[in-house]
Amino acid sequence: MRKKIVAGNWKMNKTMDEGLALASEVVSMVKDEVKNNALAVLCTPFIELQGVAKLTEGSPVSVGAQNCYDKESGAYTGEVSVPMLKSVGTKYVILGHSERREYFGESNAFLASKTNAVLKGGLTPIFCCGETLQQREKGIHIDFVNNQLTESLFHLSEEEFKKVVIAYEPIWAIGTGVTASKEQAQEMHEKIRTHIASKYGKAVADETSILYGGSCKPDNAKELFACKDIDGGLIGGASLKARDFVDIIKSF
Ligand code: PGA
């Protein structure tokens, strides 16, 4: 059975006090209300990781970072390494979010190296892929997404690949209020799974969790999560409100 995961991507939001308050609200709501076996992850800004990790200890909620550097230590001013993330209780790391690719020029090759670093550190990468509206309109979206996976992940051994979580996030749906329809999302998730199967075999593909991201909210999560190949969500805006985030976790 592949894991069901709902990960909140807070992006560059919430000061320390606000972040700790949000995390404690999520933890108590999850404890009281969530009866399914979905895993909840809070991907906070770097500075809040330690506080949120302490606060979530012993709860069903885990902590994730939104980025990392691919080197372990050294003269890389401003960067944060996987061993550092691990030392404060981080379990997951989002890699290749479209905002990192667009604003910080992260390439598929750089993301391959970051993936290696995250796996070497024993953390779980949440690897993001997704196309622009233009690519979708040209009909090249499936090839584009498959190529992102090939170039950043397909050098991994089977054992390594099994530890990766994929998040499909169509760029045109991120923060826009426009969600992919359940048919569009399911189609891409199925294509991604088929592509994984072509490299690692059907058994590995069937065990890979593939999350959907892009304007996922309490009112559309249920129909998205009901799709055969959608195993949860990567949630931006709606993860900033405990009520909305927990309602999404309850949507399985
Ligand atoms: P959104 O963001 O839910 O605000 O669209 C999703 C994401 O960027 O991970």
Image: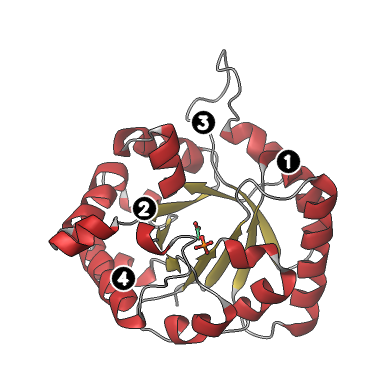
1 or 2: mark nearer the eye: 1
Inter-mark Cα distance, 3 to 2? 19 Å
Residue located beneath label 2 in the image: 161
Q: Which amino acid lies under the numbered mark 4 shown in the image of this protein?
A: His
* Disc 3 element: loop
Q: Which amino acid lies under the numbered mark 1 shown in the image of this protein?
A: Val
Residue located beneath label 3 in the image: 69
Q: Which mark is residue 189?
A: 4
Inter-mark Cα distance, 4 to 2? 17 Å
Earlier residue among tags 1 and 2: 1
Q: Which amino acid lies under the numbered mark 3 shown in the image of this protein?
A: Tyr
Instruction: Judge whether 68 appears above or below 26 on screen.
Output: above
Q: In x, y percent, where is residue 13?
A: 68, 49
Q: In x, y percent, where is residue 246?
A: 68, 75
Earlier residue among tags 3 and 2: 3
4 or 2: mark nearer the eye: 4
